[in-house]
Image (cartoon, rainbow, N blue to C red):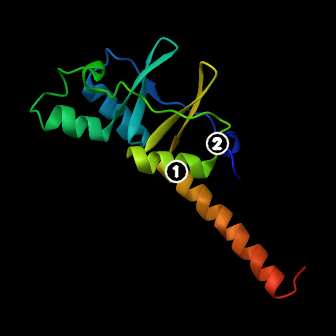
Amino acid sequence: MNSIRELLSIKGDQILSTKPEATVLQALELMAEHNVGSVLVMDQDKLVGIFSERDYARKVRLKGRASEDMTVGESMTKEVIYVSPDDRVKECMALMTNKRCRHLPVIEGDQLVGVISIGDLVKQIIADQEVTIHELEKYITGGY
């Protein structure tokens, strides 16, 4: 598998999001309920940011702010790095490594179509390597 489109077809296109007006506590509860490390921040149908555990740690907790009183819009990352469904898995892995992020929204045209995590990419790379190893073993042992 090479493209993010293929990965999303297997993973599914579930998008977990919240609004900028939501409290940080509400966002954290949503993330805990779904066992994820971030949520996209949507203003109607427009992606306006991403809120992650890192945002909470650095912009809320370390500054002594109360998660009940602070909004997601105040603490989210506003400059969102995103990819297209036609981007390659290895390119996205390199992007995440270079930009030090763990989640990437997937946007096609002006439409949000999914989100991928570094875990999704690692699982896919491992699965692809297992197929390659299996094929090489068959080739070496004359299994073709």
Residue 58 sits in quarter: top left
Front in this rendered view, residue 66 or 108: 108
Q: Residue furthest top?
A: 44
Check disc 1: other Cα within 10 Å, few if <14, some if 14-19, many if 20+: many
Q: Which residue is at 53% across, 30% downward? A: 15
Q: Is residue 136 above or below residue 130?
A: below
| Element at label 1 | helix
Determine the CA span between mark 1 and mark 2. Answer: 11 Å
Q: Earlier in the sequence, mark 1 or mark 2?
A: 2
Q: Is residue 3 left or right of residue 31?
A: right
* Labels 1, 2: front one: 1
Q: Which residue is at 53% across, 57% downward? A: 122
Question: Which residue bears the numbered disc 2?
Answer: 4
| Element at label 2 | helix
Q: Is residue 92 above or below residue 85?
A: below
Residue 123 sits in quarter: bottom right
Question: Which residue bears the numbered disc 1?
Answer: 93
Q: Residue furthest left?
A: 64
| Residue 33 percent location from the top left of the image | 39, 38
Type of residue at label 1?
Met
Q: Residue furthest right?
A: 144
Q: Which residue is at 13% across, 38% downward? A: 62
Q: Is residue 60 left or right of residue 119?
A: left
Check disc 2: other Cα within 10 Å, few if <14, some if 14-19, many if 20+: many
| Residue 53 percent location from the top left of the image | 30, 40
Type of residue at label 2?
Ile
Q: Is residue 97 left or right of residue 84?
A: left
| Residue 4 percent location from the top left of the image | 64, 42
